[in-house]
Amino acid sequence: MSTEHRFESLVCSPLQLAERLRGGEAALLPTDTLPALAACPDHADQIWTLKSRPAEKPLILMGADLEQLLPLLGGPWRQEWLHLGHQGWPGALTLVLPASGPVAAALNPGRGSLGLRIPACEQARALLRLSGPLATTSANPSGRPAATTAAEAGAYFPRLPLLGPLPWPGAAGVASTVLAWSASGTWQVLRAGAVMPPGIAP
């Protein structure tokens, strides 16, 4: 089967893909940074298997907007978190915040924190509005270069459905910046990526 015909059979509309995700499947979708491998939080465990990903490496929860993410930390949001979220979202910024509850346990087992992001990709956010927040990571097997296009992501994971339409919008090709809230009440840079908010030292 040619690549074009294989893709045609796997490309789904946002509504179709949301239904497949809620049914327990994993999927491939664009973001503003790199293509993502995604699943609903209740079915996130398959992502580690698909990627051969070390168990200690957490997943990121992506949402369509802040309102989707607010209830999922298991507690109140500090003003500092909201301030940086309003500065950096939608965008290439991941905030790792103290968290409890089933979503944190599924995406970052036993560690009491959760990475959150709202991508600046309208195609992805349209899906997220239908599917709800998704557990995500870059679309590549562990140790392999990150996919930068739908074709590369599909070659890595040829059995997974892709969000349509194709081609996906252009992306930065650089992973998101990851900032973690520390016990001392400051931001720690875990990964310097595509953006750096004002006032944060890399």
Image: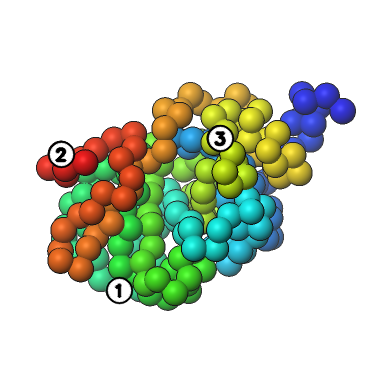
Instruction: Indicate whether 34 appears above or below 117.
Output: above
Name the mark nearer the viewer: 3 or 2: 3
Q: Nearer the viewer, residue 34 or 191?
A: 191
Residue 187 located left or right of residue 138: left
Please tell me which of labels 3 and 2 falls first in the chain: 3
Q: Which amino acid does label 2 sit on?
A: Pro
Q: What residue type is labelled 1?
A: Gly
Indicate the quadrant containing the C terminus: top left, top right, bottom left or bottom right.
top left
Q: Is mark 2 on a helix, strand or loop?
A: loop
The residue under label 1 is 75
The answer to whether mark 3 and mark 2 are in CB contact below 8 A is no
Residue 83 located left or right of residue 195: left
Q: What element carries label 3?
A: loop
How far apart in space, not on screen, are marks 1 and 2 (Cα)? 26 Å
State the image coordinates of residue 33 (x, y, percent, origin top left): 43, 34
The residue under label 2 is 198
How far apart in space, not on screen, are marks 1 and 3 (Cα)? 36 Å
How far apart in space, not on screen, are marks 3 and 2 (Cα)? 29 Å
Dot 3, how many residues are within 10 Å of its Cα: few (below 14), some (14-19), or many (20+)? few
Indicate the quadrant containing the N terminus: top left, top right, bottom left or bottom right.
top right
Instruction: Indicate whether 170 appears above or below 185.
Output: above
The residue under label 3 is 145
Q: Residue at the location (44% across, 74% down)?
A: 110
Name the mark nearer the viewer: 1 or 3: 3
